[in-house]
Image: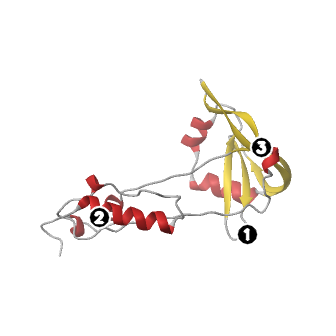
Amino acid sequence: NRPSESADTINDWVNRKTQGKIQSIITPEQISPQMKMIILSAVFFRGNWVHRFEEGLTTTEPFYAKPEFTLQMKAMKNSGKFKYARNELCQALELPYEGNRLSMVALIPNDINGIKELDEAISADMFTGLRKRMSPTEVSLVFPGFVMNYSANLSEMLATMGMTDAFDAARAD
């Protein structure tokens, strides 16, 4: 019955566990007196690239966010052999992390204003096809710096998977 205290306790824990990278995951307004339990998940990943980007090579470059909108942003530069493939819509480049257990695959539209078309066309089959065609290729890479955030309502996801009673006060046990 103390939403502010509960939110502070949860956020302090998440802040500590993610080394300050995730400082807040829940607000007092998201906590109601009817709640008996809160299930949440926070993932923090910090990996080093196999092919490291040298800070001295970082420059300011145009980033084409939309056809009518270009940003100037810091871009990392690198060159070397990377797994690479191309199709009619995009180029795919794999950036492995140290240990080679994890990697990021970047999809870069062929058309400078092609992000919307790529977003509408991408599918698991298209992505799998690109991954299968990747081969080590000498690449000169200019890559924007980025931070990635994602949040989702787990109760909605779990309900669509069939776990409905837990979110119905009349049926929950």
Provide the secondary structure element on which disc 3 rests: loop
Residue type, mark 1 in image:
Asn
Residue type, mark 2 in image:
Ser
Is 57 situated above or below 66? below
Question: What sort of colour scheme is used for the picture?
Answer: secondary structure
Q: Marks 2 and 1: CB-CB under 8 Å?
A: no
Residue drawn at (39%, 62%) of the image: 11
Side (left or right) of 67 relative to 94: left
Mark 3 against mark 2, which lies toward the viewer?
Answer: 2
In the image as oriented, which residue stretches furthest toward the top? Answer: 68
Q: Earlier in the sequence, mark 3 or mark 1?
A: 3
* Residue at the spot of label 2: 6
Residue type, mark 3 in image:
Thr
* Residue 134 screen position, x and y as percent: 76, 57
Side (left or right) of 169 relative to 98: left
| Residue 160 visible in the shown view | no
Q: Earlier in the sequence, mark 3 or mark 2?
A: 2
Indicate the quadrant containing the C terminus: top left, top right, bottom left or bottom right: bottom left
Mark 3 against mark 1, which lies toward the viewer?
Answer: 3
* Residue 119 screen position, x and y as percent: 56, 42
State the mark number for residue 58.
3
Q: Earlier in the sequence, mark 2 or mark 1?
A: 2
Residue drawn at (69%, 71%) of the image: 101
> How many labels were placed on the picture?
3
In the image as oriented, which residue stretches furthest toward the bottom? Answer: 173
State the mark number for residue 42.
none
- Which of 154 and 85 lies nearest the eye of the viewer? 154
